[in-house]
Amino acid sequence: RRRHTRCLSDWSSDVCSSDLIGEGIEVLRPEPTTVTLLLPPFPIDTAACYRAFDAMWAEGWRPHGRNHLEEPAVRVNPDLGAVLAAARAEFGDVTLAGSGSTLFIEGHHGLGSTWLTDVGELQVCETVTA
């Protein structure tokens, strides 16, 4: 098979995706999942979160959990920490996306279009992922 790229070190191009479909290969289809998305009422400075991540890493901190930017994002914006604490107290398991632009909660919670916290009103979107 020919390489699909000009980079000789790109070994990922040695296998074409069409090579992977054949007898005995099962295509997995994810189950639809219902989720509630909470959008914080303040801007998120992603570049500042990455700078905080780099500074914390240099101090010896290492990320844990599902999102490596959660702790740096809370350091940059303490209001995000308050929102996370309130959401986790109310709903249990809450996942922060990226640097904090969205909080994900599994299931629908009938919150309407907004949810009020001590730091402001969060926009709510209940959806189904596929």
Image (cartoon, grey):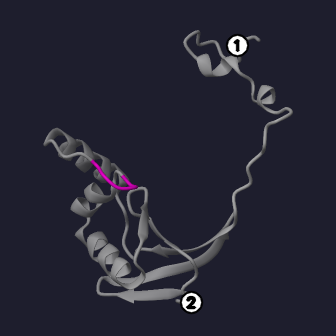
Residue drawn at 58 percent across, 17 percent down: 10
Residue drawn at 47 percent across, 75 percent down: 38
Question: Residue 77 or 43: which is nearer the viewer?
Answer: 77
Height in image: 126 above or below 18?
below
- Side (left or right) of 60 relative to 110: left
Question: Residue 40 or 109: which is nearer the viewer?
Answer: 109
Residue drawn at 45 percent across, 87 percent down: 115
**Which residue is the site of mark 1?**
3
Residue reaching furthest right?
A: 23
Residue 64 percent location from the top left of the image: 30, 52
- Whether 96 is among the magenta residues is no
Amino acid on which disc 2 is placed: Gly
**Which residue is the site of mark 2?**
110
Residue drawn at 26 percent across, 55 percent down: 72
Question: Residue 101 or 32: which is nearer the viewer?
Answer: 32
Task: Report crowding for label 1: few under 14, some 14 to 19, many 20 or more residues within 10 A (C-alpha).
Answer: some
Height in image: 7 above or below 58?
above
Residue 76 percent location from the top left of the image: 24, 60
The C terminus lies in which quarter of the figure?
bottom right
Task: Report crowding for label 2: few under 14, some 14 to 19, many 20 or more residues within 10 A (C-alpha).
Answer: few
Question: Residue 47 or 59: which is nearer the viewer?
Answer: 59
